[in-house]
Image (spheres, rainbow, N blue to C red):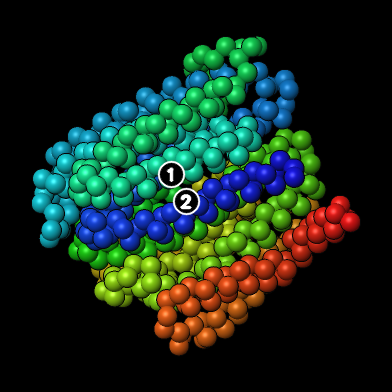
Amino acid sequence: MNLLSKNISANLLSNAWLTILMLILTPLYIFLLGVESYGLIGFYLSWVAILGILDVSVSVTAVQEIAWRSARPEMKKTIPVLLKSLEVAYWVIILFSGLVILIGAWFFGAGWFEAKSLSPEVIRGALMLMAISLVVQVPSGLYIGGLMGLQRQVECSTLLVIFGTLRGLGSVLVLWFISNDLYTFFLWQIITTFLQTAVMRWSLWKKIDTSEQLAKFSAKMLLTVKEYVGAVMVIGVLGMILSQVDKMILSRMISLQDFGFYMLAWAVVSGFSRIATPLINAFSPLFTELVAKGDEDALAKQVCVASQLMSVLIIPPAALLIFLSKPVLLIWIGNEITAEGTASILMIMVFGAMFSSCSFPSVSVLYSRKKLMPVLTINLICVIGFIPLLILSVYYFNTIGAACVFSVYGIVLYVGYQITGLRGLPNTTIISSILKNFLIPLLVAFFIAGVSAYWLSDIKGNLIFISIFLSSLVIGWIAALFSCKDLRKIVMEKLIWKMKTYL
């Protein structure tokens, strides 16, 4: 198995496990803490994403620059200085940001939410612990990005599985056996995320060769990547606004219970990024390496394979959730009121998440080419257009309005990045690429999901429902795969090779 296949397998398996773990633990969080407390946990996850603007700008720079320099022998020796410079700058900014959030939580946290079962003092204390947890968690993104740039994704994925399991499963255990309150939850998050960041840092630095050049801070080195970092940070700010402003607006305009329903739907939808992100993390260093070598033909081929593989993995589960959102939620959560309140929101948001996830390969090409102006332009247009639309939608249609805006945003991202990201690739046209890489597997997957939904509509037993649902998902994956010409060819070649090997 070549390096790309190993990286894809490791990333997908690790994120599949973390997604399954999330699906198992979320109902337990709601059971142990209540839906209002779960809303606060969702608010915490939103702030992880907000501080992720710094994480994205620095970690993406680490991935791209380390991959770029690793492909060029004359520049490889500069990696230690680059990494140390990014690390120092990163920690200074994140500590300052954490202090600002901590002060804000003290002065404004108690009156931010409209809560029934949680006192203002409990909310304030939870938000302050949340700020500390953010400071120790977010920097791990830099070290993850460095390992990805070195294409050490198997090791990185293993560590993410270990600490993700420790953080998630451990949270339930301490809530169950020690104390089922928000303080206990966030204290456990602080402990485990600190350990994750420390181990990730150690793992990355032991892979860095400092024999030719010592690792030291260099302002001059930061200046060599300032334009790229600056552009990525601006894009990150715009992306953060677009992806998180709905939570900020909803948290002020609706009840904490309704916000909990929305965050539950968002937690499910975020599972798609657990599929899309590891897949594109495996391909992104390869894209950058091919760009550095000037091999445009190989780049076009790999982008096509990545796009088809993304569609195959994302669209079948999305189609089933669109058709079966309420029964799936009811079996998962076990609460009729929660399932009813979340189902419509989830169905709409899944549609948008499907489009935005399938845009990852084309936008990754833009990052690898260091052509960030199209990304910046698309995000700026979306900020200007969607925020007023979001406010009006929430005012008139509550959470359903926010879900619709989320979905439209995903469609705009997909179309925009296909037009800008695929431009200039050899033997690639926008229409043909969308048709063969997205529309054909979409039609196949939705047909299978529709048939499955028809048969499942009369099923009463949970076990039978789950068995047919999972069988339909597997059939959808296989059918979507064989509807993609390039993937089908790769799979058939590997099967023939395996058969010849065994025979």
Q: Does residue 302 appear left or right of residue 36 in this picture?
A: right
How many dots with numbers?
A: 2
Residue 37 image point, x, y percent: 22, 55
The answer to which of marks 1 and 2 sits earlier in the sequence is: 2
Residue pictured at 68% horizontal, 22% vertical: 75
Quarter containing the N terminus: top right
Residue 183 location, quadrant: top left
Of 483 and 467, which appears nearest the observer?
Answer: 467
What secondary structure is found at the residue carrying circle 2?
Answer: helix
Q: Amino acid at mark 2?
A: Leu
Q: Is residue 281 left or right of residue 30?
A: right
Q: Which mark is residue 164?
A: 1
- Density class for disc 1 (Cα within 10 Å; few <14, some 14-19, many ≥20) is many
Residue 433 higher or lower than 425, as above or below: below
Q: Which residue is mark 2?
A: 18
Q: In x, y percent, where is residue 450?
A: 55, 81
Q: Is residue 26 visible?
A: yes
Secondary structure under tag 1 reads helix
Q: Nearer the viewer, residue 163 or 384?
A: 163
